[in-house]
């Protein structure tokens, strides 16, 4: 059963997700000074999952009876989301906030392309041009950073690889969420993903390391949990009432949001947020990534017949 489109509501939800995802790597970098990626990710899912279960308990209870009918997709989507979070945070350890957000733009690009195959959305010349622009910008930014980070090239390459894998995990999650939303509702689906991720990561976490965080670090860690709830809740609701290609297009603003926040906070809180040494060519590449991502996603305006 298809859901009615509501572009205004979807845009508001998308901008909530943009602000949340744009600020996320800054908070994560603070947490990663003392806490390992798996523990940080576990806390994010545990906080988001607990609040979701309390807030949407009636809707979740109503949808739980149908979980068994779609268990395979629920598990695949939940593991995809878990892998996305862990790989992203792990990659962030070897990368800057801006770099991480640019490489994770492969996620909405790939999701837009998957939408052509799975959800029968059209592939136009705009989308093809957007793909070329995004890959050109990403390549320009990548090779420019190789020169700027010559002393840490191996770490940088490893971080980029982890971020690409994180993007692939996000596409698996988003595709499953898109299929399951009309059948179960976005709240039960998201709750299942959070629960599965929490149970999967629990045996590998080191919660004792949280005690090494200072007060700002603890606030940042709690914010990461709330951030997960807001970003993924808003995204899940957005693709429930708007075309996935349109939603993907707005997410092109995420790296721009991150770079602006880094520029602002590095002046007012340099102890916690470091300024990024970015050349003109790298910034040009970043702009092409954002433009290409938006164009690629907006290239689908009709569905295939």
Image (cartoon, rainbow, N blue to C red):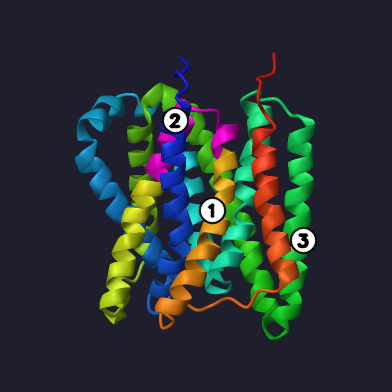
Q: Is residue 2 left or right of residue 103?
A: left
Front one among 108 and 81:
108
Q: Please tell me which residue is depicted at 79% across the width and 55% down the height of the picture.
A: 136
Q: CA distance from mark 1 to mark 2?
A: 19 Å
Q: Identify whether 158 is placed above or below 229.
A: below
The magenta segment: 232-247
Instruction: Say if the magenta span includes residue 235.
Output: yes
Q: Please tell me which residue is depicted at 44% across the width and 72% down the height of the picture.
A: 265
Position in image of residue 131 (x %, y %):
75, 44
Mark 3 in CB contact with mark 2 (< 8 angstroms): no
Q: CA distance from mark 1 to mark 3?
A: 18 Å
Q: Which numbered mark, 1 or 3, is in the foreground of this view?
A: 1
Find numbered disc 3 in the image and state the secondary structure of the residue it sits on.
helix
Location of mark 1 (residue): 254
Position in image of residue 244 (x %, y %):
56, 32
Label number found at residue 8: 2
Location of mark 3 (residue): 139
Q: Is residue 180 visible?
A: no
Disc 2 crowd rating (10 Å Cα; few below 14, some 14-19, many 20+) is: few
Mark 1 in CB contact with mark 3 (< 8 angstroms): no
Front one among 53 and 146:
146
Instruction: Say if the magenta span includes residue 276.
Output: no
Front one among 290 and 65:
290
Q: Quadrant of residue 247?
A: top right
Q: Please tell me which residue is depicted at 32% across the width and 61% down the height of the picture.
A: 223
Q: CA distance from mark 3 to mark 2?
A: 34 Å
């Amino acid at each position: 059963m298809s859901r009615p489109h509501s572009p205004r509501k979807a845009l508001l939800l998308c901008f909530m997700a943009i602000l949340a995802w744009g600020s996320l790597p800054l908070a994560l970098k603070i947490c990663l000074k003392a806490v390992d990626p798996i523990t940080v990710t576990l806390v994010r899912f545990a906080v988001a999952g607990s609040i979701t279960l309390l807030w949407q308990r009636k809707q979740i209870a109503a949808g739980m009876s149908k979980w068994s009918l779609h268990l395979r997709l629920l598990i695949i989507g939940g593991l995809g989301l878990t892998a996305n979070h862990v790989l992203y945070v792990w990659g962030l350890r070897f990368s800057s906030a801006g770099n991480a957000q640019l490489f994770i733009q492969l996620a909405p690009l790939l999701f837009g392309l998957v939408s052509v195959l799975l959800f029968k959305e059209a592939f136009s010349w705009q989308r093809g041009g957007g793909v070329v622009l995004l890959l050109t910008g990403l390549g320009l930014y990548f090779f420019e950073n190789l020169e700027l980070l010559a002393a840490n090239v191996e770490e940088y390459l490893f971080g980029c690889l982890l971020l690409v894998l994180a993007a692939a995990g996000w596409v698996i999650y988003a595709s499953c969420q898109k299929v399951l939303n009309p059948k179960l509702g976005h709240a039960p689906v998201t709750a299942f993903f959070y629960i599965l991720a929490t149970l999967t990561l629990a045996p590998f976490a080191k919660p004792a390391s949280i005690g090494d965080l200072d007060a700002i670090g603890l606030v940042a860690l709690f914010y990461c949990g709330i951030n997960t709830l807001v970003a993924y809740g808003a995204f899940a609701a957005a693709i429930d009432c708007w075309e996935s290609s349109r939603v993907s297009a707005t997410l092109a603003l995420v790296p721009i949001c991150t770079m602006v926040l880094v520029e602002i906070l590095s002046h007012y809180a340099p102890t916690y947020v470091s300024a990024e040494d970015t050349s003109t060519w790298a910034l040009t590449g970043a702009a092409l990534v954002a433009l290409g991502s938006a164009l690629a996603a907006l290239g689908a305006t009709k569905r295939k017949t």
